[in-house]
Amino acid sequence: MSNQFDLAVIGAGAAGMMCAAVASQRGKRVVLIDHATRLAEKIRISGGGRCNFTNLHAGPNNFLSENPHFCKSALSRYTPQDFLSLMKRYQIAWHEKHKGQLFCDDSAEDIIRMLKAECDAGNVDWRMGSKVDEVQKQEQGGFLLQTSAGIIRAAQVVIACGGLSIPKIGATDFAHKVARQFGLKIIEPRPALVPLTFDAKAWEPFVPLSGISLEVDIETGEKKSRTVFREDLLFTHRGLSGPAVLQISSFWEPGKAIRINLLPEVDVAEDLVGNKSTIKKNLANHLSQYLPARLVDGLLTAHGFAGDARVADMQDKRLRLLGEKLNRWELIPNGSEGYRKAEVTRGGVDTRELSQQSMMANKVPGLYFIGEAVDVTGWLGGYNFQWAWASGTAAGLAI
Ligand code: FDA
């Protein structure tokens, strides 16, 4: 078994397999190394087992990064249509769920099999179950990798070890460690696309609402930095989750507020105050035409309103306050569920250290970083895989 390669890719996940497939099919001798024994576990569990593999509308605006322009080049050179063409060759059926999100009809395993077949078509050498302990740059050129399966030498190395989310399925900070070792800056990593939590005492009144889901507008930030999503929100025992909260979590800054409009299509204060004299029902019954009764009861109790009060008898000031709570509910999370539950890691290798064409580190010729390890974080909805495919392809074509 040869231990000398043109390219060693560390991390056989979405980005690593894509890069290995592209480079190997261009005639490079490629070894793909992963400490996990099962291939691409994150693809397997993604999208509820059906993998939301891309988004038809993916563009630079759907990504967070200290340097928002960095992702443009790779994304424009490998588009969602390119990935669909690849899937067509493998006859993998898919469907659009909503907002351009594409899922496999059958299983995420189809994507894993396709990428494995693409690597096999280029005769990629597999080293699954092999931990990389160290990456050393050699004076005579190239790199030496100390791995649990022995020494591997490669002219070039791609770090595709992903982010820190879900350590129990093999996530590590290896990519960040290698970047630091070579003097590259790291944008402080933190959990993103993650449920938000609240102080246990303050959240107590909302615990009975856990399990309820509804479409809301959710926002954070002020003026120029204000970001809004309309998505489903889910109440949990410890706080808030669902697509709305996962989306906003990536933008939320610790200590800052999030604001939720539980009834985006109704101005509650205007409805209650304006129609006060004609509303015959009590408060709870009136609001139940807009929201599930259990949610109405829970929210009224939590905010200190009596559900059986006659709307006509209530002061305008109280009705406006209720409108504020329903249309502009402001909360300050005390944190998030962390990497244990986060779908991705925000931050990572500073893109100013990398070439946007090739993903190679400017200071370290031959060393590349791709996928989630890089400070490019997609919204929820297939964008993170699109970045994995695009950045993997950019490096694979440059090597
Ligand atoms: P990825 O994490 O895929 O691969 C990294 C690989 O490196 C792993 O195989 C790991 O074992 C290996 N590794 C780590 N350290 C190593 C070391 N020291 N030595 C050797 N190997 C090492 N995105 C999306 O677009 N649509 C979706 O539907 C979902 N759904 C989803 C669900 C859940 C539960 C999670 C946690 C995440 C998602 N995502 C997602 C995000 C998506 O999975 C993620 O962005 C990509 O997998 C990132 O691809 P990478 O190849 O960069 O890392």
Image (tube, helix red, strand yellow):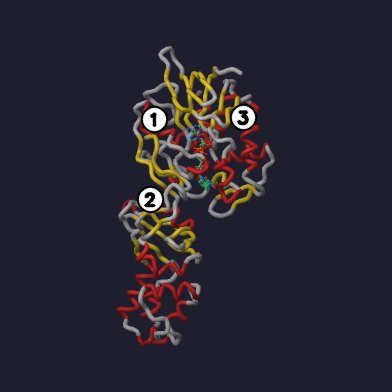
Between the C-alphas of marks 1 and 3, the distance is: 26 Å
Q: Is residue 92 left or right of residue 340?
A: right
Above or below, 42 relative to 140? below
Say whether disc 1 or disc 3 marks the residue closer to the N-terminus.
3
Q: Is residue 97 visible?
A: yes
- Residue visible at 43% across and 36% down? 173
Q: Which mark is residue 179?
A: 1
- Residue 11 at x, y = what percent? 52, 33
Mark 3 residue CB less than 8 A from any atom of ligand 1: no
Between the C-alphas of marks 2 and 1, the distance is: 25 Å
Of 28 and 140, which appears nearest the observer? 140
- Residue 376 at x, y = what percent? 42, 40
The amino acid type, in three-letter code, at marker 1 is Ala
The amino acid type, in three-letter code, at marker 3 is Cys
Of 280 and 138, which appears nearest the observer? 138
Mark 2 closeness class: few <14, some 14–19, many ≥20 residues within 10 Å: many
Tell me the residue that label 3 is attached to: 119
Tell me the residue that label 2 is attached to: 251
The amino acid type, in three-letter code, at marker 2 is Phe
- Residue visible at 39% across and 85% down? 309
Q: Is residue 179 left or right of residue 100?
A: left
Q: Residue farthest to the top?
A: 140
- Residue visible at 38% across and 65% down? 203
Say whether disc 2 or disc 1 marks the residue closer to the N-terminus.
1
Instruction: Indicate the quadrant where residue 205 lies.
Output: bottom left
